[in-house]
Image (cartoon, rainbow, N blue to C red):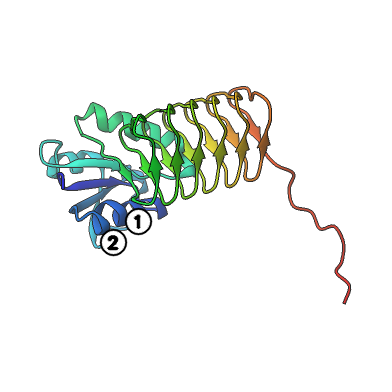
Amino acid sequence: MGKPLVIVGTGLLAEQVHYYLGTRSGRAVDAFVLDAAYIREPRFLDRPVLDFAEAQRRFPPATHELFVAIGHTAVAARRRWFDAALAAGYTLPSYVHPSAWVAENVRIGANTLVQELAMVAPFVQLGENLILCPQVGINHHTRVGSHCFFAPSASVAGDADIGPGCFIGLGATIRDRVRIGEGCIIGAGALIMADCAAGGLYRATRTERSREIED
């Protein structure tokens, strides 16, 4: 079953991780962790909310593991917390939902969450600290850098490269052999047919009202 957990974050993703690793998997979750400046309430889901120094004192790496559950709006913060947790000596577990399918020759890295009906095909190379939301598809021989977030139903074709720290939005589609540079944001519904330079925002056309509907 593994050691008890502390979870970084108190948002919607943290609540999901508490469900997956705590309620569903039967592991004890003893505390939530935030930067001291962001602590607004002393408890979350009936657990204490602590700064990192206090969490290390009360729930050290010798007795606890840690999961960084910071969502899509703060990819850089999730990377910072991941590095800090490793430096402090914590083991960072991962979770793959039973309905997801990950090929046997794919390694799941630390602090990775693979949610319902996600698919990771053979020969994919995954980095660390990834979030794969429901129905994400990553096809054969694609390489995914660490610290990426894939929103629901994002799809990547074969032999693509996704750089570290990217956000791939809801229902976005990335064609085969495309290279997405580090830190890119691919917006919801975007269709990516060519390489994307690092640090860029790429989005689909926004919804516009075409006409009035006649009775």
The mark nearer the N terminus, 1 or 2, is 1
Q: Residue 83 is drawn in which quadrant? A: top left
Q: Is residue 81 left or right of residue 56?
A: right
The residue carrying mark 2 is 45
Q: The disc labelled 1 sits on which kind of residue?
A: Glu
Q: Is residue 88 left or right of residue 176?
A: left
29 up-or-down from 142: above or below: below
Q: Please state the horizontal and vertical placement of residue 81, each as a whole percent of the image.
A: 33, 35
Q: CA distance from mark 1 to mark 2?
A: 8 Å
Q: Please state the horizontal and vertical placement of residue 68, each as a whole percent of the image.
A: 33, 41
Work out whether residue 121 or residue 200 is closer to the camera in this orientation and state it.
121
The residue carrying mark 1 is 15
Residue contact at pointers 1 and 2, CB within 8 angstroms: yes
Characterize the local packing of mark 2: few (<14), some (14-19) or many (20 or more) Cα atoms within 10 angstroms.
few
Residue drawn at (29%, 54%) of the image: 18
Work out whether residue 27 or residue 68 is closer to the camera in this orientation and state it.
27
